[in-house]
Image: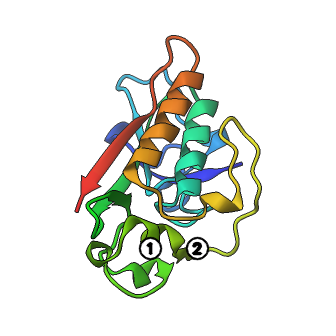
Amino acid sequence: AASCQAFVTPAFAGAGFGDDGFHIHKSSLPMSNASEPTTILMHRGVHTDFPENSLAAVKAAANLALAHPDLEMMIELDVRTTADGKLVVMHDADVSQTAHGIGFVQDLTLAQMQALALRKENGDARLPVDGPLAISVADMRVPSLEEVFAVVDAANQRRVAGSIPVGLALEIK
């Protein structure tokens, strides 16, 4: 089962979650009959299984949301501007923090950013991954914000009628 880091409303703190209170597992998602609605925020996508903020992490988060149409799920991402004025998803200004490369996002072009090999902290990802939004080796890279919008749009087009749309929480750096 896929997992993701999640932040939830206080009504669910510690209820059916991992020991640290932040990891959510498919089998332990809160029931939708709670008194308060819950928003599950997938921090930097599913970065426990894929490099944080990568296109793969975004697709995995969207797939998790598709598997739970009754829950409000949002993907939280960090956005920075490249030297050529494009918006990319990257937490740190210094690319060496999460990628095999040297430099700052603001000094690199979109093409240079997307050529970087991203690091994953928790071992190798198992690829390819089947699902509504398939994940391949090509997705283990820095996405443009435009690509993220396309993934979320594709996920929302696949949602069951009447279900809660997948949302984005963007931190502009």
Give the mark nearer the N terminus: 1 vs 2: 1
Q: Which mark is residue 120?
A: 2
> Which residue matches tag 1?
112
| Vertical arrangement, residue 140 with respect to residue 12, above or below | below
* Residue 55 lies in quadrant: bottom right
Query: What is the x, y in percent for residue 40?
Result: 43, 40
* Residue 139 lies in quadrant: bottom right
- Rounded to the nearest angstrom, the CA distance separating label 1 from label 2 is 19 Å
SS class, disc 1: helix
Q: Quadrant of the C terminus?
A: bottom left
SS class, disc 2: loop
Kind of residue at badge 2: Lys
Name which residue lies at 30% across and 67% down. 82
**Left/right of residue 135 with respect to residue 81 in the rendered view:** right
| Vertical arrangement, residue 153 with respect to residue 88, above or below | above
Name which residue lies at 54% across and 31% down. 154
Name which residue lies at 65% across and 60% down. 138
Whether pointer 1 and pointer 2 mark residues with C-beta atoms closer than 8 Å, the reply is no
Kind of residue at badge 1: Gln
